[in-house]
Structures are given as C-alpha cells and as structure tokens.
C-alpha cells in the first residue's frame, strides 16, 4: 500500500549538488583484476567513481551541500534560499559511514548549517534519497514557520565489506555524495507528486535465511547480495518474485502520476536508478516503453550506482547540463531493498545558468 503525499502546500527544489571522486575506467578495473572482463562487459558501464584515502562518506555529502546552497542562494526566489532557512536535515545512506556509533547527519549539519534543527539519518538503502524527500515534504507542510530542508546522501563502497563489482551482480556501486535543498518559498522546479510504496514480503531477498523466516546474523564479508537473491527466488519462485516487484513499482508510478495530475506521455525525462544496462532494461525501460535517450544513462554509465543518491545526482546533471528547460516534467524513480519503491514528478519552472 502506498504512502502518497497529498500536497497541502507547494514544495520547490531550490538547489541541488553532487560531489564525485575521480572515475575509474572499466578497462583499468579489468587490468587491475578488480573485475573480470565478462562481468564488466555485461554491465555496459564505462567507468565508476572511486574515493581514495580515508575520506568518510559524510564529507562528500558536505561538499555536495555546498554546491546545492550556492545554487539555492541565487535560485528560485528574489531573496534566494540560504543555510539559515533550513528547518530539517536528512542524511540518507546505504553502507557504512566510516565510524561506529556516530551521527553522520549531525556531522553534515555541523559542517553545513550549524543550527540546532532536527538532523536525522534515513536508512532506506537505495531508496533513501526519495524517502527523505517524502519526509521533508511532510515535515515542512506541517511546520508553522515552513522554510527549507537539506537532504544529503553519501556512500563509499569498498572492501573488505563491499565489493562494488561483485556484491550485487548487475549493478556497479559508486562512491559520492549528493545534496538537495527543498523550500516552501520557491526554486527552479516544483514537486508535483510523490508516492512511496512498501513491500515487506520481499525483505528476505536481501538477507540470509528463510524467505519469510527469522533473520540470522551474517558476519561473512564482502556482502553477497547475489547469493541472498538466488536463495529467495529458489524458495518463492521467479515468476512470483518478478510479479511482486513489478506490482509495487507500478503502484508507486500510478499514485505519483495521479497526485501530479500527469500522464506518462507528458513526461519529458525519466530519472532512473544507475543500474547496469541489462537490469535497467528489464526493470524499467521495457515497462515504461521508452528508449535510453529519454534517460540519463549516457551519464549514469560513467558514474555508477550512488546508493541513495541516484535521483538527486541525475537531476543535478540534467539541470547543470542545460538538458531540461522550463515547462518540462521529470519522473524520478527509485527502489530500495526492503522492499520500497518511490516515484516523484517534478516540473522545471526556470532555467539556471550552466555551471561546471
């Protein structure tokens, strides 16, 4: 069942930013023995962004937030949107943030705005960025002084805990941070509709143990999501699993379109997860009946899957590249283990000057 946001007040995208470490070409990864040539070929990825040194993910979120605030300050209203307007900080992540028993959200708050508003971590795996957008809209819609919210995402996928090439076959995981400033007062785009759908009957697909049984503790590393998925499908059945995933995604899409008063034929850009080409085709392109030219695939395949940050990063790319123009509508889609699906529709209100 969906948790659809019924707009009780307008919400705008005021600023967006991305910070990515240098890309590693796939050919270099193959030569270095990080991935075998056939697995790399099937993904059709060109490169993946890889962090170096001891940098914690939250610092990448801080850098992305700086970009988002620079855009928001000169963006959607006469006065712009600034850090002091923020009434909520939400930080979404998929993997380990670099320290135990530590608030990455608090770190982002201290390094970006420094106030004492609520700062909360969102753990919805790859759906975290969109789940945070859902929460931000609800929070600001009921806040007496409204204002703005800062949403950040950041992850670093590295051994021994996670093998970016093999832990989830079909997706190459990337390092990087993203940020989105949303405001009730104005921005470069407005959020028309947003829906989140949960399918907890599929949570067993991403853990060890019986599909619908009690969870078991796993200490082996690196993470092997492929093995968990294979065991789940063997127990539940491929057809049943695929049908359930498709059903949840369609419900989220249908609800978001209804809320936005928009038809699928009125969508100009499709912002999809940064999956490998084969998974993207089977999970999205085939069902939506669209070609890659209406997505950000040509850029996604140079970056990789940013965990919770894919939708924000792709919107940032579309805006800064000048690809989107006023009046166009973008459909943002995300999915997270658990299972949760999200869809949002945004409409571009004004063109921004191209930035780097």
Image (cartoon, rainbow, N blue to C red):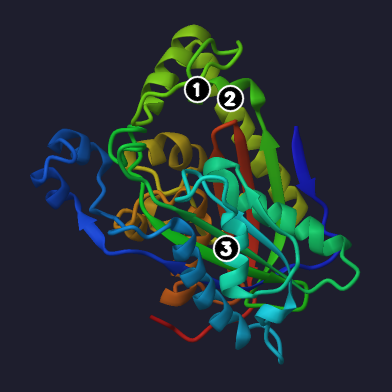
Q: Residue furthest right?
A: 144
Helix, strand or loop status at disc 2: helix
The span from disc 2 to disc 3 (Cα, nearest Å) is: 30 Å
Q: Residue furthest top?
A: 235
Q: Evaluate if marks 2 and 1 touch, with contact meaning CB atoms under 8 Å apart.
A: yes
Q: Where is residue 36? Give x, y as percent.
A: 15, 35
Quadrant location of residue 218?
Answer: top left
Q: Which residue is mark 3?
A: 107
Q: Which residue is mark 2?
A: 203
The front one of 223 and 320 is 223
Counting residues from the start of the chain, the first of labels 2 and 3 encountered is 3
Helix, strand or loop status at disc 3: helix
Counting residues from the start of the chain, the first of labels 1 and 3 encountered is 3
The front one of 44 and 99 is 99
The numbered disc on residue 207 is 1
Quadrant location of residue 243?
Answer: top right
């Amino acid at each position: 069942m969906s948790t659809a946001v019924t707009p009780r007040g307008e919400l705008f995208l005021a600023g967006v930013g991305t910070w990515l470490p240098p890309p590693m070409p796939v050919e270099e990864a193959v030569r270095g023995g990080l991935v075998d040539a056939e697995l790399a070929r099937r993904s059709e990825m060109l490169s993946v962004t890889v962090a170096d040194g001891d940098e914690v993910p939250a610092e990448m979120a801080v850098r992305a937030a700086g970009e988002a605030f620079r855009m928001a300050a000169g963006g959607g209203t006469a006065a712009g949107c600034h850090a002091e307007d923020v009434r909520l900080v939400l930080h979404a992540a998929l993997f380990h943030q670099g320290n135990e028993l530590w608030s990455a959200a608090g770190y982002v708050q201290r390094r970006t705005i420094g106030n004492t508003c609520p700062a909360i971590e969102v753990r919805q795996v790859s759906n975290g960025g969109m789940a945070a957008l859902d929460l931000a809209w609800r929070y600001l819609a009921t806040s007496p002084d409204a204002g703005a919210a800062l949403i950040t995402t950041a992850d670093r996928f590295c051994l021994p805990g996670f093998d970016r090439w093999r832990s989830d076959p079909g997706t190459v995981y990337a390092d990087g941070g993203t940020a989105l400033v949303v405001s009730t007062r104005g921005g470069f785009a407005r959020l028309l509709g947003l829906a989140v759908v949960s399918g907890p009957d599929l949570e067993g697909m991403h853990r060890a143990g019986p599909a619908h049984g009690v969870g078991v503790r796993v200490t082996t590393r690196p993470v092997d999501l492929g093995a968990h998925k294979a065991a789940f499908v063997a127990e539940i059945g491929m057809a049943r699993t695929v049908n359930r995933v498709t059903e949840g995604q369609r419900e989220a899409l249908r609800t978001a379109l209804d809320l936005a008063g928009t038809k699928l034929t009125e969508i100009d850009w499709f912002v999809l997860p940064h999956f490998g080409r084969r998974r993207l085709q089977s999970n999205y392109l085939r069902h939506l009946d669209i070609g890659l030219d209406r997505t950000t695939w040509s850029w996604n395949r140079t970056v990789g899957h940013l965990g919770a940050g894919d939708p924000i990063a792709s919107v940032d790319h579309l805006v800064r590249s000048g690809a989107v123009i006023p009046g166009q509508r973008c459909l943002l889609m995300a999915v997270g283990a658990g299972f949760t699906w999200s869809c949002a529709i945004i409409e571009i209100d004004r063109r921004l000057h191209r930035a780097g």
